[in-house]
Each structure stands twice: as structure tokens, then as C-alpha cells.
Image (spheres, rainbow, N blue to C red):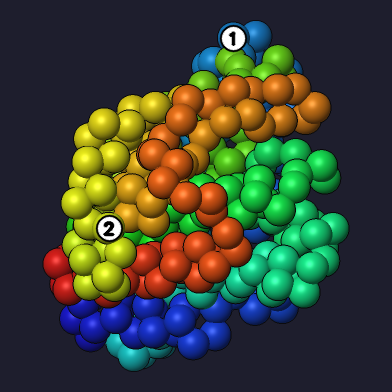
Amino acid sequence: MRLEYQILIAIILDFVIGDPRWFPHPVKLIGRFALFMETPLRKALRNQRLAGTMIVALVAAVTLLCAYGLILVAGLIHPLAADIVSIVMLYTTFAARDLAGHSMDVYWELKNDNLAAARRNASLLVGRDTEHLDEGEVVRATLESVAENTVDGVTAPLFFAVIAGPLGAILYKVVNTLDSTFGYKNERYREFGWASARTDDFANYIPARLTALLIPVAAAILGFKPLDAFRILFRDGRNHPSPNSGLAEAAVAGALGVQFGGLNYYFGRPSERPAIGDPLRIMNRQDIVRAISLMFAVLILSAVLFL
């Protein structure tokens, strides 16, 4: 089966069934393996940056070997079996349905005036502390997560799938998972997580910029603010600790006419982020629905562009 058909079927599968909890998702297995290898590598190598670099190489190599082996064995059984395995692998790298579902969980709890539940649901989307957020801060956290994860869970896996097939998409998820696991700037991971964070920055460099340019197009289609999306993208896209995340956030903020950034807390420690966007209005829970519609529009546009 041609690669573009495999990718299209995988996208449809993600849209229809999302990420069932009973399914042994590769990201969970990758994360567990990485955590399992952390202590041995830390003990074996004094240089923590080197240990962190080795864990990136090790987890990537083992994951690629397993993925390639599965496709190879399936192909020996029947070519169709190899196609099915490839499609399932590709499907596991997309997270549009899951991102939309978690975000809508926040929306519905806010609509039902259940702020405590909305905070808990928001904690599944973001790394910041959520237990003391007010409604506006919960909305902001959710919107920022949708913007950032439009790259991580939608366009970047698609980009690498087109370039290198299922193995390329799986390799991207390895990089992204390692960054989520170790890429923290705290005392424990500042050195050990350096390679994971830098590799993720490198992998997302092109997808983040393509996504940021597609968001204004999606905004025009949906009747939002495409010109403001472009303006804020180029003005505020670098107002973020990450060289990539701020781009999509800036484009989404401009498209919706809201402002991101401000004070966040991570593990009880304050982190002041520069403003992204203009506060043309106070953001509200309906913006979550708008951001999700932008994400799906970008998915369709990127599929048309890449495939």
C-alpha cells in the first residue's frame, strides 16, 4: 500500500477512535523504558549530559529496531499484514482526537461551573500547577496546550511520516516523549535532560514553523483573525522559552484575539512568561472550542499540503 494511503487511514483512525485506554500505546512503553534506563546510565556515567545523550541514542535505537522488526515479521506473514502494522504505528503517533477530547473535558466542566474538575482535567494537558488556577487561567492553560500540541501531536508526526514513513513518525515520538520525560530545567534534569530537550527543539524546528504559517490560513477559513495571526506570529513568536512553542501560540493568540503568557507555577515555583498577543478581549471557555477547530483545520490543511 502506498505510504500516503497508510497515513490517511492512520489519521482517520485517530479521528474516529482516538487513544483507547486499553491499547498498549507505544508512547507509554517508550516512557517506561526510558525511566527504567535512567538510573543505570546515571550510575555508569559521571557526566550527566553524556548520560542523557546516551539515553536518547539507546531509546531511539531500541524503539526503531523493535518497530522495524514488527514490520519485517508482519511482511513475512503477508504484505497486507505489514501494511496493517505500519498503519497502526502511524496511528499511534497522532493525537488530534485525544487532544480535542481532553480539552473539551475542561470546557464541559467549566460550562457546568465545576472549576475543581476543570483544573484536574487541565492538569492532564499542561505541566504547570493547576490546583489554584481561576477560570481564566484554566482557559489560558488549555489554549496554550492546544496551540503547542497542534505541532507535537498533529503536524510534526505527519511531517516525519511523509519524510520517513512509520519509522520516521515513531522516531519523532521517541524524541518528543524523551523531552516530556527528561526535558525539565530543574536541578534533577538540567544536565541529564539537556540532550532530550535539544533533540526535541531540532526535530520540531521545521514543523513548528510550517504549523505557525498554516494557522492564519485556518483562521481565514474559520472566520477568525488571520491578519492578526500573522502579525502576532512575527511580533511575539519568540516570546517563549522554547524556540518552537511560541510560534504556534502566537499565531493562535492572534487568530483568537487573546493574550497568552503571564505567571505560571511549576512544582510550586513561579515562572513569569512574556506576553504573547494583544488582550483585545477576555478569553473565555468558548475559546477552547475555537482553538480545537483551528487545530482540526490545520490538520486538514497539512494533510493536503504534505500528501
Image coordinates for residue 227, horizontal then vertical, percent: 19, 51
Q: In the image, is residue 110 above or below residue 85?
A: above
Q: Residue at x 68, y 65 (%)?
A: 106
Residue at image point 59% right, 9% down: 47
Q: Residue furthest top?
A: 46
Quadrant position of residue 182: top right
Task: Using the image as rendered, state which of residue 122 and residue 178 is in the foreground.
Answer: 122
Residue 195 percent across, percent down from the top left: 48, 25
Asked if residue 75 is positioned above or below residue 62 in the image, the reply reads: below
> Residue 187, position in %: x, y?
70, 15
Disc 1 element: loop
* Residue under numbered circle 2: 225
Q: Tell me the quarter of the picture where residue 183 sits.
A: top right
| Sequence order check, earlier mark of 2 and 1 | 1
Q: Is residue 4 left or right of residue 181?
A: left
Q: Nearer the viewer, residue 183 or 77?
A: 183
The type of residue carrying mark 1 is Asn
Report the Cα–Cα distance between label 2 and label 1.
Answer: 49 Å
Whether pointer 2 and pointer 1 mark residues with C-beta atoms closer than 8 Å, the reply is no
Q: Position of residue 109 (x, y in %)?
A: 75, 70
Q: Which mark is residue 226?
A: none
**Quarter containing the N terminus:** bottom left
* Res. 47 mark: 1
Q: Amino acid at mark 2?
A: Lys
Q: Identify which residue is drawn at 66% across, 32% down.
A: 264
Asked if one can make out residue 119 in the rendered structure from this viewpoint, the answer is: yes
Of 279 and 197, the residue lying toward us: 279
Vertical arrangement, residue 130 with respect to residue 42, above or below: below
| Secondary element at tag 2 | loop
Inspect this view and state whether residue 207 appears: no
